[in-house]
Image (tube, rainbow, N blue to C red):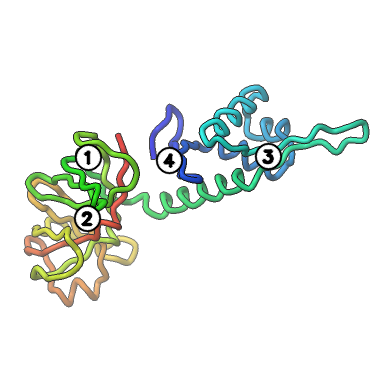
Amino acid sequence: MTKSKDEPEYRLEIGGKLILLDKKKFNLLKFIDECGSITQASQKSDIPYRSALKYIENLENDLNDLLVLTKRGGKGGGGGSELTTKGKLLLREYRKVESVIKMHTDVNEIESEIAEIDEEKKIINIYFGEKRVILPLRGEFKIGEKILVLISPEDIFLTLEPQKSSVRNVFKGIITRMELKNQVVRLNIDLGGVNLFADITQYARDELELDLGKEVFIGFKAAAIAVVKL
């Protein structure tokens, strides 16, 4: 996801090609699908007709495929516009990303940069201070590129001792804050220069006898991490 001047743009992969789509262009395509008319869709999405045509043209050029089919009407009518299968797929992918973003708006956000790339293993490495963090290689990245790492508090697990598992990202930290939030206990954990928050149940907190200042180990899978280019 990237930021435009007014609203976020989502980076979507359609047919092996990457495309940026914001809410305004999404609404234009959605209203074409609903109304069967570019003219009506441009009015409902508050986009000038010529700009709407240009938006569609640019999107189709980026995808190298048609998104909108337009039929000219005769004297008896019969004209109109409709989305192609690829156009409908673009709407679906946007809705999926938007839903995920809404579900995970409350996430850990950490700015870093790409330190190492392993094309063979399909992973990239970054560092939280001296701690190496393994991320999945999704998309194209370059060493030294600035990124934003997003980790949901629900994807972080806690233990009192380091354990052997398939999870490679395991770090020792200290609990610095605890609060009840939306029926779960939110913990702030200092990893030594980097702070993360994790959500656990009250039952888990009591079972582990967690309290301020207690040393814990946290972990999260590489696949659970989202990476955004800055």
Determine whether label 4 and label 2 are within 8 Å by CB: no
The mark found on residue 11 in the picture is 4
The residue carrying pointer 3 sits among few (fewer than 14), some (14 to 19) or many (20 or more) residues within 10 Å by Cα, namely: many
Secondary structure at badge 2 equals strand
How far across and down, in percent of the image, does residue 175 sit? 12, 59
How far across and down, in percent of the image, does residue 106 sit? 33, 51
Indicate the amino acid at tag 1: Glu
Indicate the amino acid at tag 4: Arg
The mark found on residue 134 in the picture is none
Question: Could you tell me how far apart the alpha carbons at marks 2 and 1 are, in whole angstroms?
Answer: 15 Å
Q: Of tags 1 and 4, which is closer to the observer?
A: 4
Q: In this view, does 78 lie to the left or right of 67?
A: right
- Judged from this view, the residue extending furthest toward the top is 50
Residue holding disc 2: 197
| Residue beneath the point at 55% across and 28% down | 58
- Viewer-proximal residue, 90 or 116? 116
Q: Of tags 3 and 2, which is closer to the observer?
A: 3
How far across and down, in percent of the image, does residue 139 sit? 34, 43
Q: Of tags 4 and 3, which is closer to the observer?
A: 4
Question: Could you tell me how far apart the alpha carbons at marks 4 and 2 are, in whole angstroms?
Answer: 27 Å
Compared with 168, 79 (above or below) is above
> Sequence order check: which comes first, mark 4 or mark 2?
4
- Regarding residue 179, the answer to whether it shows in the image is no
Question: Could you tell me how far apart the alpha carbons at marks 4 and 3 are, in whole angstroms?
Answer: 21 Å
Residue holding disc 3: 32
| Residue beneath the point at 37% across and 53% down | 104
Secondary structure at badge 1 equals strand
Question: Could you tell me how far apart the alpha carbons at marks 1 and 3 are, in whole angstroms?
Answer: 38 Å
Indicate the amino acid at tag 2: Phe
- Viewer-proximal residue, 188 or 220? 220
| Residue beneath the point at 43% across and 27% down | 5
